[in-house]
Image: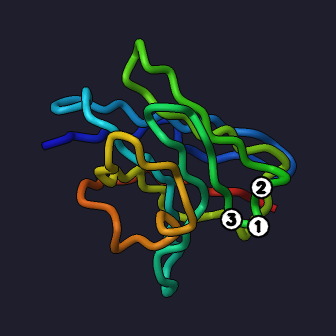
Amino acid sequence: QVQLVESGGGLVQAGGSLRLSCAASGRTSSNYAMGWFRQAPGNGREFVAAISWNDGSTYYSDSLKARFTISRDSAKNTVYLQMNSLKPEDTAVYHCAAAPMGGAERLSSKYYWFEEYDYWGQGTQVTVSS
């Protein structure tokens, strides 16, 4: 079992930046793909980025990778999402999620799909004003 708690959301003007945090607790010694997804009202869950807990390899949504950066701090059991040059269309609830990986498994496009993730945080609201 893994528990995830997001923080760092808020209201920001277009062009601004925010850094979201996802604190993990529980069985964090195993290898996980840690992902960020977002969901705007009336829309489905959208993949943002993922990172391998073991080796730090990353995978991004093509449309967001120029502005968003995912990272992790293993000592703090925390994953971050740095969001720059924010736009009103980035407004959404951002969720952190964890998907168990094999010990030697490499991060792949498999983790683009939210169905691969077993554990989810409650989400943090990001609102970008124009």
| Mark 1: amino acid | Asp
115 displayed left or right of 126: left
Location of residue 53 in the rendering, given as x and y in whole percent from the top left corner:
44, 35
Distance between mark 1 and mark 2 Cα atoms: 6 Å
**In the image, 97: left or right of 112?**
left
Where on the picture, by quarter, is residue 28?
top left
Report which residue position mark 2 lands on. 65
- Residue neighbourhood size for the residue with mark 3, other residues' Cα within 10 Å, grouped as few (<14), some (14–19), many (≥20): some
**Residue density around tag 2, few if under 14, some if 14–19, many if 20 or more, within 10 Å:** some
Quadrant location of residue 4?
top left
Residue 80: which disc?
A: none
Whether residue 98 is situated above or below residue 108 in the rendered picture: above
Residue at 76% over, 67% down:
62
> Dot 1 surroundings within 10 Å: few (below 14), some, or many (20 or more)?
few
Instruction: Say which residue label 1 marks.
Output: 62
Q: Are marks 1 and 2 in contact (CB under 8 Å)?
A: yes
The C terminus, quarter of image: bottom right
Q: Secondary structure at mark 3?
A: loop
Residue type highlighted by circle 3: Ser
Considering the numbered disc 2 on the image, is that residue within a helix, a strand or a loop?
loop
Badge 1 element: loop
**Callout 3–callout 2 Cβ contact below 8 Å:** yes
Q: Is residue 104 left or right of residue 51?
A: left
Write the residue at 32% across / 62% down: 117
Amino acid under label 2? Lys
Residue 10, image x, y percentages = 56, 44
Which label belongs to residue 61? 3
Does the CB distance between marks 3 and 1 fall below 8 Å? yes
**Marks 3/2: CA–CA distance:** 6 Å
